[in-house]
Image (cartoon, rainbow, N blue to C red):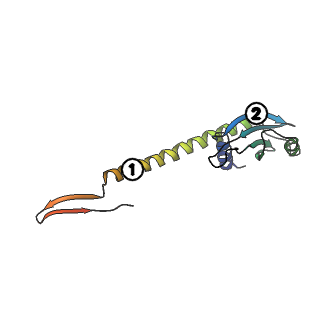
Amino acid sequence: MDYNTLKKEYGYDSTSEGLVDITQTSVSGHDLIHIYDNYKSRWDSTGFNTSYVFFSTGTKIFKISYKGDKITNEIKEIIKNTPKSKMSEETFITKLDNAQRDYLTEEYNKNLELDLEDYYRTYNDEHDRGHFYYWGTNGFGVGGTHRY
């Protein structure tokens, strides 16, 4: 994954509402993070029951997602058969930590901007700032503009 994809994928998966467990381990010399997510939506109370495995191979980080809560032998075999990692454990964890931090910062800023937009929209609706009343030489009048 390139950094922007890692930030979006790992950032979201590692902070999901349905997060049940995050485990750091290794398989055949590949450092990995296993995330188990069982988010239950209002439409599906059975939960997602999904695992995400982020692992290092060569100089890259890859992601595998699948149904279930364990790292199966099939998943271990896939990871085992990828090129050996050239990344130290510290580098691997640092990349994931940075991706998560940057994801959370971007989400915070995006939500802050949306909250501000909602505030102004609500304020304008409550105060009907698009209309005004006046007394002029010809009597009482109403004026204003509409902003949509």
Residue 135 in the image: x percent, y percent?
14, 59
Residue 60 in the image: x percent, y percent?
77, 45
Residue 5 in the image: x percent, y percent?
68, 49
Residue situated furthest left in the rendering: 137
Q: Residue at x 56, y 41 (%)?
A: 105
Q: Residue at x 66, y 43 (%)?
A: 40
SS at badge 1? helix
For the residues carrying marks 1 and 2, which lies nearer the camera in this image?
Answer: 1
SS at badge 2? strand
The front one of 91 and 1 is 1
- Residue receiving disc 1: 122
* The quadrant where residue 85 appears: top right
The front one of 24 and 137 is 137
Q: Residue at x 34, y 50 (%)?
A: 126
* The quadrant where residue 92 appears: top right
Location of residue 143 with respect to 15 vertically, above or below: below
Q: Which mark is residue 13?
A: none
Left or right relative to 88: residue 99: left
Q: Residue at x 64, y 44 (%)?
A: 12
- Give the class, few, some or many, for how many residues have Cα within 10 Å of label 2's Cα (few <14, many ≥20): few
Q: CA distance from mark 1 to mark 2?
A: 45 Å
Q: Amino acid at mark 1?
A: Thr
Residue situated furthest bottom in the rendering: 138
Whether pointer 1 and pointer 2 mark residues with C-beta atoms closer than 8 Å, the reply is no
- Give the class, few, some or many, for how many residues have Cα within 10 Å of label 1's Cα (few <14, many ≥20): few
Mark 1 or mark 2: which comes first in sequence? Answer: 2
Left or right relative to 70: residue 129: left
Q: Quadrant of the C terminus?
A: bottom left
Q: Amino acid at mark 2?
A: Gln
- Residue receiving disc 2: 24
